[in-house]
Image: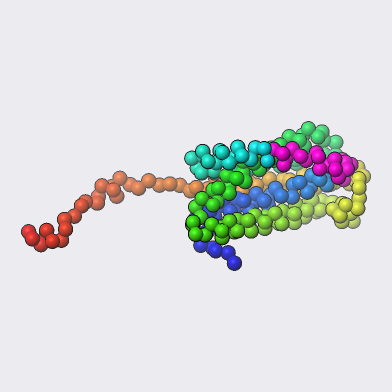
Amino acid sequence: MLDLSLFANRRYAFSVLAATFQSLAIFAVNFLIIFYLQGVRGYSPLTAAFLILPLPVLTSVIGPIGGFWADHDHLKGTTPATVGLILQVGALIVLAFLTPTTSYLLLAVALCLMGLGSSFFWSPNTSTTMGPAPRGRLGVASATLNSMRNVGMVCSFAVSLSVAAASMPPNLVNAVFLGTVVHLPLSISNAFSEAMSHAFIASAVICLIAIFCSVIREGRKVAAPASSITSVQPTEPVGKRRAR
């Protein structure tokens, strides 16, 4: 189902891997934050939705700047994509310090970092991915990128919720994640905040793998030795040698 020959190109292969690991690390973050705002902090669903607006707003506003940077980057988008991933690791580290009494300002800072990271990563990484793809296989290359990214998004829920649920009492896991508990008691709120911190740390580790893939995608460009250029001497046509 996949055209594996596309992955013979180093830049394409590691760009797809970077997108996959980034989706695996980041996609479930909003999901956990919504549970935190509603279950731990007691906000209504509408208020919680408004409180996470810094992330999508910054992503949409700064996104064109990320594309402009990619167009003028001598590494063809690798630099802004890597910077975006570093910003997202920083956001995940900040989110790992959330507690039931944390000021919203800290959460807003983390959401802004996450939004900036997304705006610098997505467009440049897509450009870096599609650039080396064969002209006649652009549709397949794009579909492969989207498929791998969707796999990362789906698995992100499994990873984050598994890590978070492992630190909570089993009898409350379903109640919390199914939304049947509107506001958690203080003891459960502390347990959920700690479990959520573990999930964010796991996401940060996965995002570091994405940074590794982003950095090494270019490889090393080794210049040809001078001897290999000067050693080739022009030869006379065979007919002239025979005439002599």
Which residue is rendered at x = 85% and y = 40% of the image? 47
The percent position of residue 18, horizontal first and vertical second, equals 60, 50
Magenta stretch encompasses residue 48: yes
Which residue is rendered at x = 67% and y = 51% of the image? 23
Front position in the image: 236 or 106: 236
Which residue is rendered at x = 80% and y = 38% of the image? 51
Asked if 31 appears above or below 241 in the picture, the reply is above
- Is residue 137 visible to the viewer in this orientation of the structure? yes
Left or right, 68 with respect to 98, comes to left
Quadrant of the frame with the N terminus: bottom right
The percent position of residue 80, horizontal first and vertical second, equals 58, 40
The percent position of residue 10, horizontal first and vertical second, equals 50, 53
Which residue is rendered at x = 79% and y = 47% of the image? 32
Give the farthest residue toward the left.
244
Front position in the image: 19 or 65: 65
Q: How is the image coloured?
A: rainbow
Left or right, 48 with respect to 119, comes to right
Residue range (magenta) = 38-58
Quadrant of the frame with the C terminus: bottom left
The percent position of residue 173, horizontal first and vertical second, equals 86, 54
Front position in the image: 164 or 29: 29
Left or right, 141 with respect to 44, comes to left
Front position in the image: 26 or 150: 150
- Is residue 110 visible to the viewer in this orientation of the structure? no
Give the farthest residue toward the bottom.
1
Q: How many marks?
A: 0
Give the overall secondary structure of the magenta segment. helix
Magenta stretch encompasses residue 103: no
